[in-house]
Amino acid sequence: MSNVTGQLIPVNTLIKQIRNIRQDVIIVVDGAQAVPHLPIDVKKMDCDFIAFSGHKMLGPTGIGVLYGKRKYLNMMNPFLFGGEMIDKYLPMGLLSTFYLTNLRRELQTLTER
């Protein structure tokens, strides 16, 4: 979905066309605009990764979701460990739990519509 015009991009159709040409292409979808407004079925979509942000769903700023197929996630190694980087910007613990709880609540609200 375009954030400028609201036009729906036929992502499922595009992914099917790509898969018909090449099976080995890793497909990443930016779902920031669509996830808050449309039902998304990642299995039906057949993308390898989809990312979206919390604040686009009236959740907290600074957090989001990266969904990935397990086969690719298992191949990836973390490039950061621990919360040292986050501690510079946001105290860990209760505040981060608060943010994640709010994001979960917004996701539940959207799926109930």
Image: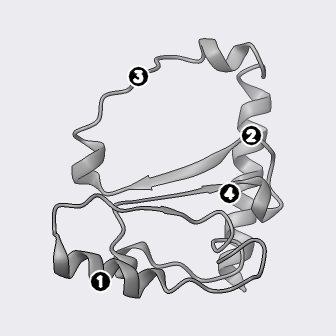
Q: Alpha carbon of mark 4 to alpha carbon of mark 3: how far?
A: 25 Å
Q: Alpha carbon of mark 2 to alpha carbon of mark 1: how far?
A: 32 Å
**How many residues crowd around disc 1 within 10 Å: few (fewer than 14), some, or many (20 or more)?**
some
Q: Quadrant of the C terminus?
A: bottom right
Q: Amino acid at mark 4?
A: Arg
What residue is shown at x 58% (from left), y 66% (from top)? 31
Q: Position of residue 14 (x, y in %)?
A: 38, 81
Q: Amino acid at mark 3?
A: Phe
Mark 2 = which residue? 62
What residue is shown at x 77% (from left), y 81% (from top)? 5
First of labels 2, 4 by sequence position: 2
Q: Position of residue 96 (x, y in %)?
A: 73, 33
Q: Alpha carbon of mark 2 to alpha carbon of mark 4: how far?
A: 14 Å
Q: Secondary structure at mark 3?
A: loop
Q: Tell which tag, 2 or 1, sits nearer the viewer.
A: 1
Q: Secondary structure at mark 1?
A: helix
Q: Tell which tag, 3 or 1, sits nearer the viewer.
A: 1
Q: Tell which tag, 4 or 3, sits nearer the viewer.
A: 3
| Residue 104's disc number | 4
Q: Alpha carbon of mark 4 to alpha carbon of mark 1: how far?
A: 30 Å
Q: Quadrant of residue 79?
A: top left
What residue is shown at x 46% (from left), y 79% (from top)? 41
Q: Secondary structure at mark 4?
A: helix
Mark 1 = which residue? 16
| Residue 4's disc number | none
First of labels 3, 1 by sequence position: 1
Mark 3 = which residue? 79
**How many residues crowd around disc 2 within 10 Å: few (fewer than 14), some, or many (20 or more)?**
few
Q: Alpha carbon of mark 3 to alpha carbon of mark 2: how far?
A: 19 Å
Q: Amino acid at mark 2?
A: Gly
Does residue 60 appear left or right of residue 20 in this picture? right
